[in-house]
Image: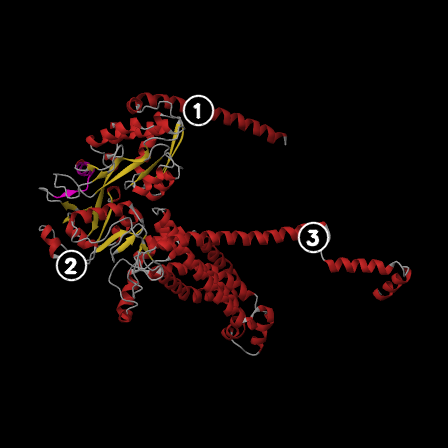
Amino acid sequence: MKLQRMNRRALSLGALAVSGALALTACGSDDTGSSSGSSSSATAAAGSIKCDDAKGQLLADGSSAQKNAIDAWVKNFTQACSGVQVNYKGSGSGAGVTAFTQGQVAFAGSDSALKPEDVTASKAVCSGGQGIDLPMVAGPIAVAFNVSGVDNLTLDAATIAKIFDGKITNWNDKAIAALNPDATLPDLKIQPYHRSDESGTTDNFTKYLIAATPDNWKYEGGKAWQAKGGQAAAGSSGVAQGVKQTNGAIGYMELSYAKDGLGTVAVDTGASAPVKASSDGATKAVAAAQVVGTGSDLSLKLDYNTKAEGAYPLTLVTYEIACDKGNKAATLPATKAFLRYIASEDGQGILSGIDYAPIPDAIISKVRTTIEGLS
Amino acid sequence: MDISTHNTDTDDTPPPTAPPAVTAEQKRAARGATRPGDRIFLALSRGSGIFLLVIMAAIAVFLTYRAYLAISKDDANFLTTFEWNTGLVPPKFGIAVLAFGTVVSSIIAMVIAVPIAVAIALFITHYAPRRMSGPVSYVIDLLAAVPSIVYGLWGALVLVPHMDGLFGWLNDYLGWTGVFSWDDGAPRSMLTVGILLAVMILPVITNVSREVFRQVPQMHEEAALALGATRWEVIRMSVIPFGRSGVISASMLGLGRALGETMAVATVLSPDFDIHASLLNPGGGTFAQNIASKFNEATEFGRDALIASGLVLFVITLLVNGAARMIIARRSEYSGANA
């Protein structure tokens, strides 16, 4: 008994000594780390992120398409403003807008602009104001394929529509061969993959087909896939995985999922060269968009038929939705500070590195002005 | 001995005091519970029973109301439409494909799982050496503890890529039936889902069947053996008739899981809103899978529509359970109660 007690005391002394030493060394390494390695980014962040008197928890919900961008922003933002916790739940645009109109979140992310009935509903939570759309992120939707022996593939809107509608069923079809004179196309069944869940990606993909080739895509559009046939999978990751598993498959997904052995289709837009999905191409396409929102609402209408050089028209714009007036007093400073950061040059600057696209200058400057006016 | 002591007792006690004591006891027995413990327990259990009914009624009212909101705005026939698009103006959605897919995938699962489960249960109880039956039951129990999303991942990553051979074979030899024709698509079809569901419901059916087969009276089996029956004849004549209603109940438990399975189906199936004759080509859908994949992006109205589809699943489950109870009741002469 006595022996045990002595042992324990000796052990705890030892533990104390070890942990003390660890703590000391940890402190030392920390100091040198921050002074040499991360000083540049820390000062840059401190320079651009204005915390003001923002603090507390900022709840947000919505689009899963912009979740990765939000995560990156939140990481930088909370480093600078340690008093604010941003909690973005990527449960989907529909859920986000519902949460917003019920007053559960400070702002929502959505892949499509507010519908008139959503605006009406938002007036209940924005006292004296209404919900507005602020375009913050663009993202190219890649059409990825997995065909053995084919590395580069060019398609135009009409061919894409016919493939996804089951009108073109074999890879050696004349329409595809005409667009790809150099490729050796195999005699292989095409297996088009689409989303089985409702999705803003589907909505934007079909919007493109409706606008660019109305004769070949006669469906009404929306978040649910409407064409018959083909394969379906849940989520962009499910589609990417399905395309990877199946020789002869083709599917649409956000660019960040089109990796690891998947080729992406270059879209023949009528410009001098076909355009591959890229962050830069998406920004150029958004530059051709029109602001159609009224007042401080900045919802965009993309020009899907743009022939601008290097513009990739198959692009999705996702919005942050907040009240123009009547934001909750408790969360207004934090909302403003966070939105101000993500619309800033630094905030937009990190997007192309994570397969999103920044909003072009002409539009983002309007967003910045609008954010300053939020109350 | 007993009688004599009893006699002396009655002799000792004076006659006038004995009758009132007896009547008080009888009264207490007639009135039932009178001590506080009994009364409190009665109130608690009765309250719990009523509470459960109230909860169920409240859920039913809520679901029916929300379903009514959705169906009253549905532009298409809710029962026969091959489409699910609540975002349209006016919205169009119907459950025909979902009902068909739910029933078909569950039937496939039952056809595969029930014979295998019964065979495993018989093996564990009557054939396997004791040293082996323990581990086999243990592994089956483990299968039941695997969460369904893990089955879904396993199905999508392992099962689907390995179905090509089976599907090709079925198409070659049975393709002429139309039910087993295959267009070389990725095998993410109703049959794959059925096979996955079969694996998932196997442990439930096996466990209950095993317990039932263990309850077969030893005398029945020994009597059969004494008449010169082989082990198979013992099983056929005494074990299976005795366990039949138990196996049916077990299968219904499994069917319940197959009907309501959500994430595994949503991960494996390639759904569309069409009914296909072929079980091998992708397509179809189930209620639970459709709710899982549409819920995230659904608007308030879209959720009401999904709730309406859930109500139909509830009705189907109710019908299936009712039918199972009728079958069991008809076979009650074989049940353990009469053995």
Amino acid type, residue under disc 3 in the picture:
Asp
The quarter of the image holding the C terminus of chain B is bottom right
Q: In this rendering, would A31 be left or right of B8?
A: left
Q: Secondary structure at mark 3?
A: helix
Amino acid type, residue under disc 1 in the picture:
Ala
Q: In this rendering, would A87 be left or right of A182?
A: right
Q: Which residue is mark 2?
A: A187
A321 or B184: which is nearer to us? Answer: A321
Task: Name the chief secondary structure element in magenta.
Answer: helix
**Which labelled disc corresponds to residue B38?**
3
Tell me the mark number nearer the camera, choosing from 3 and 2.
Answer: 3
Where residue A218 appears, as percent x and y from the top left, is 20, 54
Residue A99 quadrant: top left
Do residues under tags 3 and 1 come within 8 Å of each other at their CB atoms? Answer: no
A232 or B170: which is nearer to us? Answer: A232
Q: Same chain for the residues at labels 3 and 2, yes or no?
A: no
**Quick one: which residue is furthest to the front in this view?**
A128
Amino acid type, residue under disc 2 in the picture:
Asp
| Residue A277 counted in the magenta span | yes
The quarter of the image holding the N terminus of chain B is bottom right
